Amino acid sequence: MLIAPAPPQVIDKGRPGAGLLAQVLVSKYADHLPLHRQEAIFERHGYALSRSTACDWVGACAEPLFPVVQVMRERILASGYVNADETPVLMQTNFEGGGKQCAWLWGYADRDGDVVYDFRTSRGRDGPL
């Protein structure tokens, strides 16, 4: 008996397929649907998807998507027209003690509506773009 090799997975040895991962990412980032709401939606449809699992999936997708973000960043910078926004955000540094520090989120957009974000914990020379 010959068994075909399993198709490549976005998450090595992971259970979710690319379609489910895309659904979670698009819902979170394009449709602004937080993971706790997605968890409730999946539950209503009879599927158990914990928020922590969805959060792990989002994190696991960052590395494979990084080359796409790099190309988008290069195109935005080469477009000759860049809108930029700097937003200070509080970042939790100590989950048990509730410690927080100020960090910065920069958004960059071109005329076509493409947007990339850059998160930094300081405003030093190493960032943004």
Image: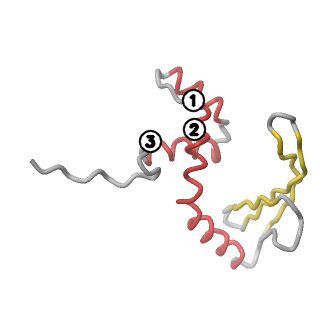
Return the mark for residue 27.
none
> Looking at the picture, how far across and down is residue 34, in whole percent?
67, 36
Who comes first in sequence, dot 1 or dot 3? 3
Q: Is residue 60 above or below residue 76?
A: above
Viewer-proximal residue, 81 or 67?
Answer: 67
Residue linked to disc 2: 54
Residue at screen point 70% across, 62% down: 116
Tell me the kind of residue under disc 1. Ser
Identify residue for label 1. 50
- Quarter-of-image position of residue 72: bottom right
The secondary element bearing badge 1 is classed as loop
Where is residue 27 drawn, in percent x and y? 59, 41
Q: Judge by depth and name the residue closer to the eye, 20 or 9.
A: 9
Q: Is residue 9 above or below residue 35?
A: below
First-in-chain label (3 vs 2): 3
Question: Residue at point 53% right, 22% down?
Answer: 43
Q: Amino acid at mark 3?
A: Pro
Q: Mark 2 is on which residue type? A: Ala
Separation (CA) of disc 2 from disc 1:
6 Å
The residue located at (87%, 36%) in the rendering is: 98
Q: Count every numbered label the image shows and give the total.
A: 3
Q: Give the residue displayed 62% in from the left and 69% down from the top.
A: 70
Q: Which residue is mark 3?
A: 16
The percent position of residue 9, horizontal first and vertical second, equals 40, 52
Work out whether 26 lies above or below 72: above
Residue, far left:
1
